[in-house]
Image (cartoon, helix red, strand yellow):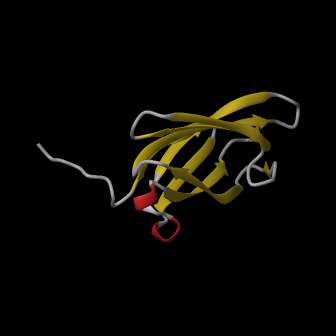
């Protein structure tokens, strides 16, 4: 589990390699990642935007930005949380993801919440210990 806190908003991420959706012989490696956003601040926030930077083990980077997450722009009240699961395919057996959420308070203030960097590791990655 990877975690990061910005202004009382805790973002936790748990990636899972999806063997059944991956095809290593065709350079297709797929992960699901579950994100939990807990509001430990004193005010409600609405998740307006998302930004992801996805980098595979060869250094190829893709940026993804858009409104909300999984078709929603949830309001998260103090003491509450929101959880969703999404996915990411790569052409290599490992990679990294990092990003941010654009949040908005009821009075219209916008701010960015960090998504912790997390690794996408499959059992197909060859590792050497020196």
| Viewer-closest of 63 and 23 | 23
Residue 119 lies, in percent from the top left, at: 43, 47
Asked whether the viewer can see residue 114, the reply is no
Q: Residue at x 53, y 67 (%)?
A: 21
Question: Residue lying farthest front?
Answer: 26
Residue 26 appearing in the image:
yes
Residue found farthest to the bottom = 20
Task: Please state the total of marks drawn on the protein image.
Answer: 0
Query: Is 23 drawn above or below residue 43 in the view shown?
Result: below
Where residue 115 sits: x, y (%)?
Answer: 57, 40
| Residue 68 percent across, percent down from the top left | 77, 45
Rendered residue at 43%/33% (across/down): 59
Of the pair 7 and 98, the residue shown nearer to us: 98
Q: Residue at x 49, y 65 (%)?
A: 18
In this rendering, is residue 6 above or below 36? above
Vertical comparison of 10 with 113: above or below? below
Relative to 102, is 52 on the left or the right?
left
User: Residue 94 location in percent, x, y?
Assistant: 40, 48
Q: Residue furthest left?
A: 130
Q: Is residue 24 left or right of residue 81?
A: left
Locate residue 46: give its quadrant: top right
Q: Is residue 74 left or right of residue 90?
A: right
Please give the name of the residue rendered at 48% of the width and 56% of the height, measured from the top-left corner: 28
Looking at the rendered image, the quarter that the C terminus falls into is top left
Q: Classify residue 99 by image quadrant.
A: top right
Task: Please name whichever residue, 79 or 82, is drawn nearer the observer in this view of the structure.
Answer: 82
């Amino acid at each position: 589990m990877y975690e990061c806190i910005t202004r009382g908003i805790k973002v936790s991420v748990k990636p899972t390699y999806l063997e059944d959706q991956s095809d290593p012989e065709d350079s297709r490696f797929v992960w699901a990642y579950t994100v939990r956003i807990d509001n430990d601040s004193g005010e409600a926030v609405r998740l307006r935007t998302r930004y992801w930077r996805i980098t595979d083990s060869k250094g190829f980077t893709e940026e993804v930005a858009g409104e909300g997450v999984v078709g929603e722009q949830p309001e998260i009240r103090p003491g509450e949380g929101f959880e969703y699961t999404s996915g990411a395919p790569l052409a290599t057996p490992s990679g990294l993801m990092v990003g941010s959420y654009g949040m908005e308070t009821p009075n219209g203030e916008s701010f960015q919440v960090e998504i912790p960097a997390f690794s996408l590791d499959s059992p197909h990655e060859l590792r050497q210990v020196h």
